[in-house]
Structures are given as C-alpha cells and as structure tokens.
Amino acid sequence: MVDKSHLIAVREKQQELQRLLNEWDPIGVMPGEFAPSDQYDCLLGLLDRLQRGDEPGKLPRYLRRRLSHAFGLDPDQSHPEQFAERVFAWYWADPLPGRKTPSG
C-alpha cells in the first residue's frame, strides 16, 4: 500500500525544487515568463540523488551532464557548483523522512 502522506511530501519537495531551479535559471530563459514553467523538469532527478544520500561532490557533475545533454550549452556558465551547494543545504535542512544521510 502506498503511503499517501509520503507521496504528498515528495510532490511538495518536487515543487520546491522546481522553484529553486527556475530561480537559478541556468540557461537564462526565465521559466514561466518567457519559457514554459516546466523548462527544467529534466533536472528534477536531483531530488532522487538527494534522497538516496549522494555526496555533495556528485551533484555538480550530474548538473553539468544534464545541462550539456538537455540544452547543449556549456554548463560552467551557470555555476553548477554553487547551485549544488544551495540545493544540498535546502534538502538536508528538511529531508524527506526515512532517507539516507549524505555519504560525505
């Protein structure tokens, strides 16, 4: 049986992460204003990585790969390390229950 409260918590985290991604706006398109508000949904896999306890150093590599693959742009222009630090701190300030702690 699926725990409905857990599904709600996950959806809320996804929405918060989407807001953070849109604020970061790594390709400079202003989602919701000049681009679809779901422009960065391809980066929501960050939540899975945070839930499984990925170490902070893995997040910028993930972001670089996804930005390069999904948008064909130089990911370093958007400073993925800074965003990774921000999103890591955001998630672990209030993690989803029962998730692994970061591994390093």
Image (spheres, rainbow, N blue to C red):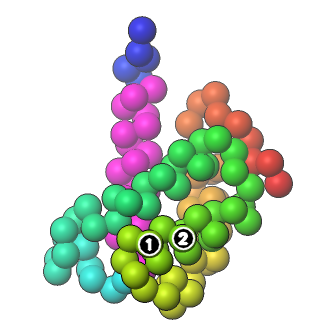
Say which residue appears at 38% left-offset and 60% top-offset. 42
Position of residue 76 in the picture relative to residue 6 (left or right): right
- The local crowd at label 1, few if under 14, some if 14 to 19, many if 20 or more residues have their Cα within 10 Å, is few
Between residue 51 and residue 63, name the one nearer to us: 63
Asked whether the viewer can see residue 23, the reply is no
Range covered by the magenta-colored residues: 6-26
Q: Verify whether residue 7 appears in magenta.
A: yes
Circles 1 and 2 in contact, beta carbons < 8 Å: yes
Q: What residue type is labelled 1?
A: His
The chief SS type of the magenta part is helix
Position of residue 27 in the picture relative to residue 79 (left or right): left
Between residue 15 and residue 103, name the one nearer to us: 103
Q: Is mark 2 on a helix, strand or loop?
A: helix
Tell me residue 19's x, y (percent): 36, 62
Q: On the rendered image, what quadrant is the N terminus found in?
A: top left
Say which residue appears at 69% left-offset and 45% top-offset. 53
Q: Which residue lies furthest to the top in this view?
A: 1
Q: What residue type is labelled 2?
A: Arg
Tell me residue 20's x, y (percent): 42, 65
Position of residue 3 in the picture relative to residue 88 (left or right): left
Say which residue appears at 69% left-offset and 62% top-offset. 58
* The disc label shown at residue 69, or none: 1
Q: Verify whether residue 51 appears in magenta.
A: no
Q: Quickly name the residue at label 2.
A: 65
Tell me residue 49's x, y (percent): 59, 49
